[in-house]
Image: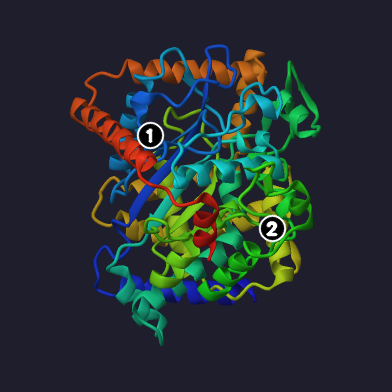
Amino acid sequence: MPASRIDRAFEKRLAAVINSGERGALQAGRRGVEKESLRVTPTGRIATTPHPMALGSALTNDHITTDYSEALIELVTPTFKTNWELLQYLCDLHQFVYRHLGDELLWATSMPCIIDGDASIPIAQFGPSNVGRMKTIYREGLGIRYGRVMQAISGVHFNYSFPERLWPVWAAIRESRTSGQSFISESYFDLLRNYRRFGWIVLYLFGVSPMVCTSFLRARGETLPEFGRGTAWEPHSTSLRMSDLGYRNRSQSSLEVSVNSLDEYVRDLTRAISTPHPEYERLGVKVDGAYRQLNANLLQIENEYYAFIRPKRVARSGERPTKALMRRGVEYVEVRALDVSAFDPVGVNQNKLRFLEAFLALCLMRESPLIDANEQAVLDGNHVTVARRGREPDLMLTRDGRNVPMLQWAREIIDQMQGICELLDEGDPQKPYAAALAVQAAKLDDVALTPSARLIKEIGETGESFFDLALRTSATHKGYFLDLHAPNEARLREFAAQAAESLEVAEAMASAPQKDFDVFIADYFS
């Protein structure tokens, strides 16, 4: 579809929102963050100690848990209507965690510390309850399918939902034949398709994993050019984490999950979690009486599908994600493409969150044709190209069957976001969204301002290895949180109470009568 026609449709819709009479229609959406960090020793090795008891139960603490590894802490904020409240909460979480880590550190980058193969990465343990066993066995399955090393990569997920008052306005503008939750879900799938089209810009602007410790590559059986002193790199890369070396997993390259509609999305995921995979069948599900994976299907559960962005609905206890989506529709989207920023103690900053909020609004408001398999392959290729070569001079991407300069396309996106930022800034004389957009626009004019270029420059100037820089930065961040003046003692007490309560809940779950685990698994998937 010609870009000019898409632009006219977008400009017409944007003007309609402005003229709707609904002040602040785009403002005060709900936003939250999930931030992962490896726990490491003072010498930068993955911690082999259990998840600290003072942080509560990883199974039942809503705000401090673990991801793949026992050493991979995940901090989860509630949702807030402002970015400053969100980042303050995330800062308080870090401060609480650091008070209970002893001499351990939280690794400051997405790409991991020195790794001594899969065996050095302990799988997260969630206790003896059926729910806990299932979570651990799922991770065992990930390990034998993809290797544990890939699972040691960490990231930041941004969860976002538009304000409720937007939807009646948007339905009227779209002259929608559907209403209520059905219309909201359709609109989020418009967004998802356009994120697949334009989301590569997030990797260019915010990717900060252009290099990696060579121990990671050895463990993965991969090679990259040497940068020096135990460091390898892709010279023009923005985000190796989001490339085919990281979470753009080659094992899932043949998996096609449509975002043309909620029905198709659920259909494709359901097919994937119910279709046997010969290679996984050879690995075995239950070997000598012990589970190695939950099943031998293409995906064990829905969360195994790695995507840049996901439609989400908070699931009820024991409810599968696809069932929650089908029953109650899309509630929010989860943007999964952010690297942990070594330049920000909490891994993310307000300018980044403001840009993402405006960018998601652009993806919602742009015309969003359906995507067929051929276009999807091209879109995936654009993402991988920017992840591996995003700072390459004169880089070209594919749009509508033609090659276009990446920077030209990126400037078009930034230009279209200006009106959205004006809406988000309405009533605020500081104009923070316009300022955040200007910060990103500057990166298109000067590639040296991108975080990936900044990281390479710092390593080049200090003579450090990637490992040395990450370890030094991790120690600096620890000092920052432990030395913060006027900590929020009330919130820290709240975290301590939540941790204690989570331990009690987990103990009650473990001591409660459990149905036969085979029956439990069969019931879950039925």
User: Label 2, on which residue?
Assistant: 380
Q: How is the image coloured?
A: rainbow
Identify residue type, mark 2: Asp
Residue 4, image x and y in percent?
59, 74
Q: Badge 2, how many Cα within 10 Å: few under 14, some, many 20+?
A: some
Residue 330, image x and y in percent?
42, 66
Picture residue at 64% right of the left edge, 51% below the top? 407
- Image depth: mark 1 or mark 2 in front: 1
Residue 328, image x and y in percent?
38, 70
| Viewer-closest of 179 and 520 | 520
Q: Secondary structure beneath disc 2?
A: helix
Determine the residue located farthest toward the left in the rendered image: 490
Residues under labels 1 and 2: Cα distance? 38 Å
Q: Secondary structure beneath disc 1?
A: loop
- Whether 521 is drawn above or below 84: the answer is below
Picture residue at 31% right of the left edge, 54% below the top? 425
Identify residue type, mark 1: Ser
Picture residue at 62% right of the left edge, 14% below the top? 462
User: Label 1, on which residue?
Assistant: 57
Q: Badge 1, how many Cα within 10 Å: few under 14, some, many 20+?
A: many
- Whether 465 is drawn above or below 412: the answer is above
